[in-house]
Image (cartoon, helix red, strand yellow):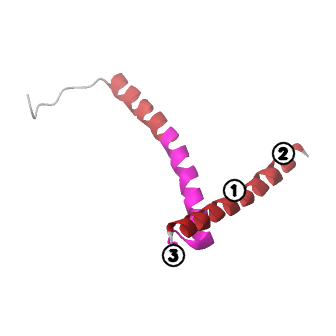
């Protein structure tokens, strides 16, 4: 019947909350990683590409991605050197 509430036991409710928290944790990790990449790209030149022609726009975006990857590689290498040395 619509509008009728049913009692959910406390244990069932707690299990649902734990499942939801675990799901949110997984999604949050992915979201944070993606947002960092877009934030870095925004700082390098934004999401607005001012070129004439699709090929030039693709090259410019590719170069921005390459620059981001190179910067990220240096960061990861430095982090690894500190951990091992």
In the rendered image, residue 85, in percent from the top left (x then y), is placed at: 91, 46
Mark 1 or 2, nearer chain start? 1
Viewer-proximal residue, 33 or 64?
Answer: 64
Is residue 29 located in the magenta-colored stretch of the structure? Answer: yes
What is the chief secondary structure element of the magenta stretch?
Answer: helix
Where does label 3 land, which residue? Answer: 52
Q: Which mark is residue 83?
A: 2
In the rendered image, residue 26, in percent from the top left (x then y), is placed at: 51, 38
Q: Residue at x 11, y 31 (%)?
A: 4
Secondary element type, mark 2: helix
Q: Residue at x 85, y 50 (%)?
A: 82
Residue density around tag 3, few if under 14, some if 14–19, many if 20 or more, within 10 Å: few
Asked whether, in this view, residue 1 is left or right of residue 10, the answer is left
In the rendered image, residue 33, in percent from the top left (x then y), is placed at: 58, 50
Nearer to us: label 3 or label 1: 3
Q: Quadrant of residue 10?
A: top left
Q: CA distance from mark 3 to mark 2?
A: 46 Å
Mark 3 or 1, nearer chain start? 3
Indicate whether 20 appears above or below 11: below
Nearer to us: label 3 or label 2: 3
In what quadrant of the picture does the N terminus appear? top left
Residue ranking furthest to the left: 1
Asked whether, in this view, residue 2 is left or right of residue 12, the answer is left
Span shown in magenta: 26-49
Q: Which mark is residue 69?
A: 1
Q: CA distance from mark 1 to mark 2?
A: 21 Å
In the rendered image, residue 78, in percent from the top left (x then y), is placed at: 82, 54
Q: CA distance from mark 3 to mark 1?
A: 25 Å
Indicate whether 3 appears above or below 6: below
- Mark 1 near mark 2, Cβ–Cβ under 8 Å? no
């Amino acid at each position: 019947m619509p509008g009728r509430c049913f009692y959910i036991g406390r244990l069932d409710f707690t299990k649902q909350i734990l499942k939801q928290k675990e799901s949110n944790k997984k999604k949050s990790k992915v979201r944070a990683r993606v947002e960092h990449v877009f934030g870095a790209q925004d700082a390098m030149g934004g999401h607005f590409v001012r070129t004439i022609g699709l090929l030039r726009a693709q090259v410019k975006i590719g170069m921005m991605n390459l620059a981001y990857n190179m910067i990220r590689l240096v960061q990861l290498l430095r982090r690894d050197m500190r951990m091992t040395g």
